[in-house]
Amino acid sequence: MAEIVQHRIEERIPELEQLERVGLFTKKEVKSIIKRATALEYKLHRLIVNKDDFIAYIQYEINILELIKKRRAHIHYQFKREEIEFPIIHRINSVFRRATNKWKDDVQLWLSHVAFCKKWSTKGQISKVFSSLLAIHPDKPALWILAAKSELEDRNSSESARHLFLRALRFHPEDKKVYLEYFRMELLHCEKLRKQKEELEKAEMDLGEYEFSAEILTGKLAEVVYRESTGKIKEAEFVISLLNVAAIFDFTKELQDFILQDLQTNYTADSLTWDFMAKRELEASVAGEELLTARGRAADINRREERCCQVYEEGVKSLNTAVAVPCNLEPMWSSYVTFCLERLKRKTNVDELREKRQQRLLGVLQRAHDSSLLKEGYYKNWLQMLLSTGDAERAASVAMAATQRHSQSVSVWSLSLQTLMQLGSGDMGRLFQEALALVNPKESLPLWQLQVQWSVANQSPEETDDVFKRGLLSTVAAVSMEIKESYLDWSYSTGGYKKARTTFTSLKENRPLSKAFFTRMIEIEKEQETPKMNSLRDYYERALQEFGTSDDDLWLQYIQEELGPLGQPENCGKIHWRAMKFLEGASVESFTYKYTLFQTGHL
């Protein structure tokens, strides 16, 4: 191994001599490089090699390159690159190849090699790296796309890029991303040829027998890709993505018209088609004196929005007659409602336009609801709009209808009950019971919290007490613990310390219990004019029975309490001993660390 390392170091001598001779590095720095390089070389030639050693070697060599680049710029010396940088770059490429041959599955290592080649102008190596990479990872479409883009952008070779895309499609014949990027590449190639032709015509150069193909210049190759891809992938979303790519280029009007016609002919059963076609109507503005005033511009926007709505209406009608399953219409209505919401959110100073948008949205929401196809998320927007316009009666009606439509949704019940609470509905008790009976008990916590909030504000103490007691019977731990904490708080706020103490005593054995339940009782005790230390000890002891094996903070708080004005400091040693005995796992180390900080005054 030593002979190999020595040979590697000797290979560096010519470049190091040049670095010293031209004044880029000092003699001391050259010695330091040799010493560091020797240590790195030994690591690469061990019997069991480590990937991190290869990465460290490569990074060190790159750092030397970066330093040489900065010093060249500083002393304005730009000669002898073949004798200085080129051997280093060659060596880095060699180490990268050794690393990727050893760890073939590490895609990031391969891509790091590609990034190095791009940065240090060794683009001839990129094709070789990608060729080796794709031979090992042909199952990753993203790598084929990267390789093709590299050929097109770095090597300016459309032919090689096309060849790679065609190979990629053999492995991934139905991959949307590969087809999309292939389509884009053909259009970029066409754009490049058009620019070349334009420049040659400006220069009035004689091309002899060479001619630019009119079909290629008009994007026929991209059209071939489109036909091939849509023959295998029959999805409106994919067709729209291809159309959006074509729209980037200014010479693709015929291609865009062809794709648009195909979309309207073969994909009308998809709501995305109607959504896309409707939104295109917004782009069709008219020029004229009318647009010079705010009202004129608002009128033009309103006309365009009306045309969009006509397309949506046509889509709803078409899908309603063509689709056998009514629920397949839901995406169509969702797109329609989303469009109306987006338009309403746009700012305008013209009140008439704002009112029309509002009325339009309310109408669409009502019709979608009547068809039982309105998603639960849109009921929130609907209720907010009705409340903002002051239509309380309608808001109450919609809130009730939402709960009937989505009777098992906690979010819908919560929203509807909040709305009815805000409107002062008189039948809230029955509605809360109905909601809790219908929803999944494991998700019912928000409804219990809402019921407690409403009961505290609107019902008698006896009725509120009954609500808490029903909550305590819940078999869901999260609900039971939250109700206990709220019950204790409510008892203290309505009946003072004595009632809170009674509530705590009645619940302290009723598991499951939360830490917050005990800490709240400790806070209540400490808020009294003359807190009782024996009571505080009782609360801490009961809390530690539940959480003493895992909660190191609780032990520390107990110790701090004993060190306080009411406590007995001589008890701290005993509490510390018990903590070390009862705590488990990482909690022991955490407690020891915090206790040490506390003793030294840093906590």
Image (spheres, rainbow, N blue to C red):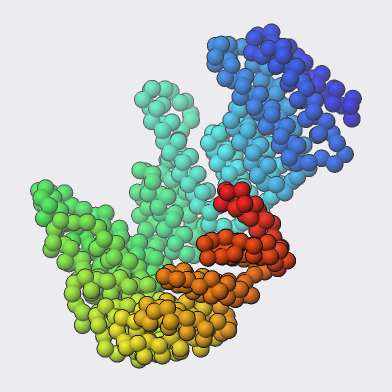
Front-lying residue, 137 or 225: 137
> Which of the 4 image quadrants contains residue 314?
bottom left
Q: Is residue 45 visible?
A: yes
- The residue located at (55%, 34%) in the rendering is 154
Image quarter of the N terminus: top right
Position of residue 219 in the picture relative to residue 348 (left or right): right
476 relative position to 492: left or right: right
Depth check: 551 or 366 in front? 551
* Residue displayed at 32% across by 88% down: 460
Q: Residue furthest top?
A: 21
Question: Where does residue 60 sit, x and y in percent of width and height?
Answer: 69, 29
Where is residue 425 drawn, in percent x and y?
Answer: 26, 85
Percent x, y of residue 357:
21, 66
Let me know if residue 324 appears in the view.
no
Relative placement, left or right, of 364 versus 104 is left
Q: Residue at image x 78%, y 30%?
A: 40
Could you tell me residue 33's position as x and y percent?
73, 21
The count of marks equals 0
Residue 477 vs residue 109, the one in the foreground: 477
Q: Say which residue appears at 41% left-offset and 90% top-offset.
A: 466
> Which of these two is toward me, 183 or 494?
494
Q: Is residue 586 above or below residue 217?
A: below
State whether residue 284 is above or below residue 408: above
Above or below, 126 relative to 559: above
Image quadrant in which you'd find residue 119: top right
**Above or below: residue 108 compared with residue 83:** below
